[in-house]
């Protein structure tokens, strides 16, 4: 912003100098850190949202600053030519326009001094959608993650904290380790705290001192050395604790519920005018967080699920009319079940929450089981924990309103229920040998594999780079192979789910040769609604 010098005043206009106007086009991402919203109109006039009505004018484009804010969340949206949209994240200069900056310590770091163009350009953004037509708009972009040339924290002034929230997931310890190592090795930060036991640990428990020696080998173990819990989020108490302890960097590792909590913490910190950065690292073993390519721990979960499927296959093939039934994680999204099925090639039927099924009658599950047993003599079924919940007994009516501490609806055990229904249905027809395997907690508790370890490292380092560069109120995530800073609201606005009209689900159906389980009496209406994606089941 310093290179684009202008003076402005309410209700008037001013003109930038001729020596500066040529740089204006390169400054848009930099300017977007400081203002609520920017956009180009049809005349290439840049619209900038501020708290005051102001007008400024350059030789090539005129800036109109108005008090309008897109919505109550103060979203920073930049729109440009050819349908370009940048969904930007908050920055310290939004609230502290005169905040001092310092040279990035990485420029003197021996490990990085030989790397060309290590610092990320301010103009770099990453598109959300990469498959486009020649006449398609450029679409939504996110700010590219990585180190900047200037930082907004001096190393000796940093007091960082790390908290893990929600259920367990492979890779938690690796993320903790790499945040500590990134802060210590890359930025020379010495004071790092671990919050014990999730969100409630901010106000109900002691902290844990973290350093290189403490975290050196923790990636070899599953779980989290900090402990975790569901619920316990009290925004006021948490921010009081952050303020009282003098913490100025907060790293929150958790799923969509935890990221909503992180957003609330950020907003309260901003309301109080505290110079504290809040960054989220998305954690969900179900891979149900939107926007991002995948979440850490997912690859490990799919790999570990193979062990259960292999065991089910051995059991099924060793007995006459053998059925191996495996229940995998997937409360609302069936990604683990789908990918584990595709990887295995031994699965005959995969049932997920996004694709409802029915049991009896033509085209139902029981008919398919009978057919497959007559053809092959055995069968392997994989079912996600959230599948078939609408088919369970009346006991589900009693628990529809029951939720866990994180606000998730309590699910009935569909694995046990469907195992019994299969046994009861075939009891008078044939002798079944059904083996039910539930590896849920075994999968959650293992350490991350090599692929997820790399993923955890890059996520952690990207979060550290973003915070040190002054970005705030963001979640770091992989978008089309590039790490980005994503606003909290985009991560929490909906869940990522398997699209059963997508080619990946078609690949699974061709692999298992299972039917779609679409009810025949609804096929006509589905044919009409198919293109709109509103099929009935």
Image: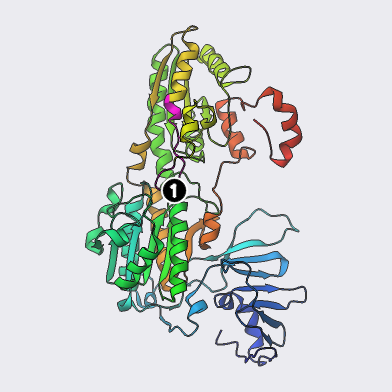
Can you tell which quarter of the image residue 12 is in?
bottom right
Up-down: is 7 above or below 332? below
Scheme of colours in the image: rainbow
In the displayed orientation, state which residue is furthest to the front.
Answer: 398
Q: What secondary structure predominates along the stretch shown in magenta?
A: loop
> Which residue is depicted at the point 71% across and 27% down?
523
Up-down: is 336 above or below 131? above
Give whichever of 310, 445 is nearer the camera.
Answer: 445
Left-right relation of 488 to 314: right
Task: Answer whether residue 409 is magenta in the image.
Answer: yes
Q: Where is residue 178 in the image (x, y as percent from the top left)?
A: 34, 60
Say which quadrant the N terminus sits in. bottom right
Left-right relation of 493 to 98: right
Task: Answer whether residue 451 is magenta in the image.
Answer: no
| Residue range highlighted in magenta | 403-416
Residue 471 appears in the picture as rendered: yes
Q: Mark 1 points at which residue?
A: 284
């Amino acid at each position: 912003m310093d290179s684009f010098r202008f003076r402005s005043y309410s209700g008037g206009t001013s003109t930038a100098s001729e020596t500066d106007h040529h740089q204006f086009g390169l400054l848009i991402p930099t300017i977007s850190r400081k203002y609520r919203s920017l956009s180009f109109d049809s005349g290439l006039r840049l619209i900038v949202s501020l708290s005051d009505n102001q007008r400024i004018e350059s030789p090539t484009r005129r800036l109109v600053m108005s008090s309008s804010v897109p919505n109550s969340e103060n979203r920073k949206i930049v729109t440009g030519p050819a349908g370009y949209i940048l969904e930007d994240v908050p920055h310290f200069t939004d609230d502290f326009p005169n905040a001092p900056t310092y040279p990035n310590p990485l420029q003197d770091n021996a490990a990085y001094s030989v790397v060309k163009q290590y610092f990320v350009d301010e103009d770099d953004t990453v598109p959300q959608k990469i498959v486009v037509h020649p006449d398609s708009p450029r679409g939504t972009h996110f700010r590219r993650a990585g180190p900047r040339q200037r930082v907004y924290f001096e190393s000796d002034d940093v007091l960082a904290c790390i908290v893990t929230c929600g259920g367990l997931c492979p890779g938690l310890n690796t993320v903790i380790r790499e945040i500590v190592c990134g802060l210590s090795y890359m930025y020379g930060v010495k004071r790092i705290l671990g919050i014990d036991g999730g969100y409630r640990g901010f106000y109900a428990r002691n902290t844990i001192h973290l350093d290189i020696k403490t975290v050196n080998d923790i990636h070899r173990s599953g779980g989290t050395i900090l402990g975790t819990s569901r619920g316990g989020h009290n925004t006021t108490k948490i921010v009081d604790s952050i303020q009282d302890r003098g913490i100025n960097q907060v790293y929150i590792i958790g799923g969509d519920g935890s990221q909503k909590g992180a957003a609330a913490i950020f907003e309260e910190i901003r309301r109080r005018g505290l110079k504290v950065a809040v960054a989220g690292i998305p954690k969900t073993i179900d891979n149900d967080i939107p926007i991002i390519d995948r979440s850490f721990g997912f690859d490990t979960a799919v790999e570990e699920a193979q062990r259960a499927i292999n065991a089910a296959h051995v059991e099924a093939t060793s007995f006459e009319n053998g059925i191996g039934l495996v229940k995998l994680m997937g409360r609302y999204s069936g990604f683990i079940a789908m990918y584990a099925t595709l990887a295995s090639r031994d699965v005959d039927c995969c049932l997920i929450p996004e694709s409802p099924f029915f049991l009896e009658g033509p085209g139902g599950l029981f008919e398919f089981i009978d057919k497959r047993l007559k053809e092959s003599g055995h069968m392997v079924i994989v079912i996600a924990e959230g599948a078939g919940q609408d088919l369970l007994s009346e006991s589900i009516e009693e628990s529809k309103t029951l939720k866990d501490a994180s606000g998730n609806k309590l699910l009935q055990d569909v694995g046990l229920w469907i195992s019994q229904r299969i046994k009861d249905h075939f009891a008078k027809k044939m002798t079944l040998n059904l083996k039910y395997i539930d590896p849920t907690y075994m999968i959650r508790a293992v350490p991350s594999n090599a692929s997820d370890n790399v993923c955890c490292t890059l996520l952690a380092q990207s979060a550290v780079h973003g915070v040190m560069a002054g970005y705030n109120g963001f979640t770091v995530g992989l978008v089309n192979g590039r790490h980005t800073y994503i606003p909290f609201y985009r991560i929490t606005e909906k869940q990522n789910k398997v699209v059963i009209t997508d080619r990946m689900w078609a690949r699974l159906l061709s692999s298992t040769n299972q039917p779609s389980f679409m009810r025949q009496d609804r096929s006509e209406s589905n044919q009409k609604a198919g293109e709109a994606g509103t099929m009935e089941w």
